[in-house]
Image (spheres, rainbow, N blue to C red):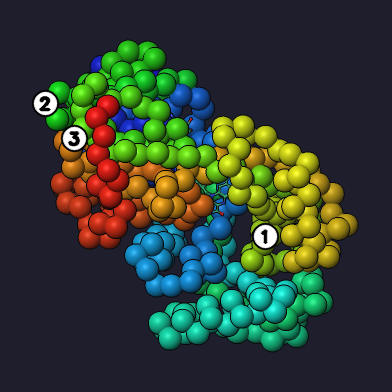
Amino acid sequence: MTDKLHPNADVAIIGGGVIGLTIARALAHRGAGDICLIERNGLGQEASFAAAGMLAPQAEADSQDDFFELACRSRDLYPNFAASLRDETGIDIELDTTGTLYLALTNHDLVDIEKRYEWQTAAGLAVEKLTPSQAQVLEPCINENVLGALRFPLDLQVENRRLLSALTNSVVNLGVSLLSGTTVESLRIEKDRVTGVVTSRGIINSPSVVIAAGTWSSFIRFSAGVEKPELVIEPVRGQMISFDARPQVTRHVIYSPRGYIVPRQDGRLLAGSTSERAGFAKQVTAGGINTILKNALEISPSVAALPIVDTWAGLRPRAPDNLPVLGPCVEIGGLFYATGHYRNGILLAPVTGELITEAVVAGVTSPLLGPFSPSRFDLVRA
Ligand SMILES: Cc1cc2nc3c(=O)[nH]c(=O)nc-3n(C[C@H](O)[C@H](O)[C@H](O)COP(=O)(O)OP(=O)(O)OC[C@H]3O[C@@H](n4cnc5c(N)ncnc54)[C@H](O)[C@@H]3O)c2cc1C
């Protein structure tokens, strides 16, 4: 699906994962002109493909901070996002509203979930506390030694691979130019303004460029001597296992503090994950699989009988403070960052698309983006 390279675009987006695709679609909906999305391999084959698709800001949150607000806003955009993608493309991204269960399996876990319950209840958020027997009635597959559980009725999940297909179809229909198999090597910058990108297939002139290159975002070169934020995005490897679970063992996504299981409509049950600093080696390892199996079996002994049908790994893009990097680059006009989504890029895609589009098209930087600005990093000379 590689379009012909046109030498001029109104906006060039680097990276065809969930973030680049969602931004391309949002820009096209806003009539932002000629939009060109550049992907060095195939669209949606990296972290966005590897993800578990959980949209669960409440399940793991320990406080009501700026990140939590952004994540909840994005989760709440999902019903409309899913419906409009379905209208445009006919693809159902399988938005599941059953909710998330979070289990306490040790006394330490119990203290943690009690705290989470207290602050979320005090903040007026939807969360239910379940006794062990209530949790087991709800999901009979769970470990009989469960000590307590929380249910987050508003947390969601999607089939992220169907989401990638829907986004790709949508941007094609909207006339976005898609250049797969094309690597952006460097940015062209003149007088503190971006003027385009140098790719493996030639130059594309563009007054606006969005870096959405996931864990490879720091490799894009800048013109020598330019002042830029010192952005270091690192890969954090996550491994996953998929089981054949027909009939399904659970309706809810179920977490413990150590792992999670995620039921899919087609009868797969996903289990994850690991968090490893292993460079760019996207491998599945014996140690990784061992950890995931141990944690999945702790959640539900029923997993022991399920055939394993697939394993994979992906690289989460992580900034030094674990927070996403979103918004305009103050030092270089026309340059925008949308990267560092780490463990939450599927969840944060709709809000990223909406707010980056507002920044590119209208020059308006939402206050929601303030805490995630690339300006929080020191400046260096390229
Ligand atoms: C195992 C695992 C489970 C996860 N589970 C969840 C979950 O349940 N919920 C959730 O919200 N998130 C989850 N995540 C995190 C989520 O997958 C990521 O945050 C998200 O996919 C990041 O999207 P992205 O588009 O920035 O990156 P990617 O999907 O990695 O896309 C970046 C793209 O940029 C391209 N690129 C890089 N450099 C260049 C260049 N120079 N020129 C052209 N193209 C370039 C790459 O080829 C790639 O296709 C999980 C991640 C993993 C690994």
Total residue callouts: 3
Q: List the single residue furthest toward the left.
A: 191
| Residue that mark 3 sits on | 332
Q: Secondary structure at mark 1?
A: loop
**Residue type at mark 2?**
Lys
When the figure is inspected, residue 232 is found, relative to residue 105, above or below; the finding is above
Mark 3 or mark 1, which is nearer the start of the sequence? 1
Location of residue 217 in the rendering, given as x and y in whole percent from the top left corner: 40, 34
Mark 2 or mark 1, which is nearer the start of the sequence? 2
**Residue type at mark 1?**
Gly
When the figure is inspected, residue 173 is found, relative to residue 30, above or below; the finding is above
| Residue that mark 2 sits on | 191
Q: Is 46 or 79 nearer to us in this picture? A: 46
Location of residue 189 in the rendering, given as x and y in whole percent from the top left corner: 20, 24
Q: Is 349 or 115 nearer to us in this picture? A: 115
Residue 35 numbered mark, or none: none
Residue 259 numbered mark, or none: 1
When the figure is inspected, residue 119 is found, relative to residue 161, above or below; the finding is below
Where residue 228 sits, quadrant-wise, is top left
Give the left or right position of residue 13, taking residue 163 as reference: left
- Tell me the residue at 48%/40% (across/down): 234
Alpha-carbon distance for marks 1 and 2?
49 Å
- Tell me the residue at 80%/61% (across/down): 297
Alpha-carbon distance for marks 3 and 2?
9 Å
Q: Secondary structure at mark 3?
A: loop
- Tell me the residue at 65%/52% (across/down): 273
Where residue 382 sits, quadrant-wise, is top left
Q: List the single residue furthest toward the right.
A: 305
State whether label 3 is within 8 Å of ligand 1. Answer: no
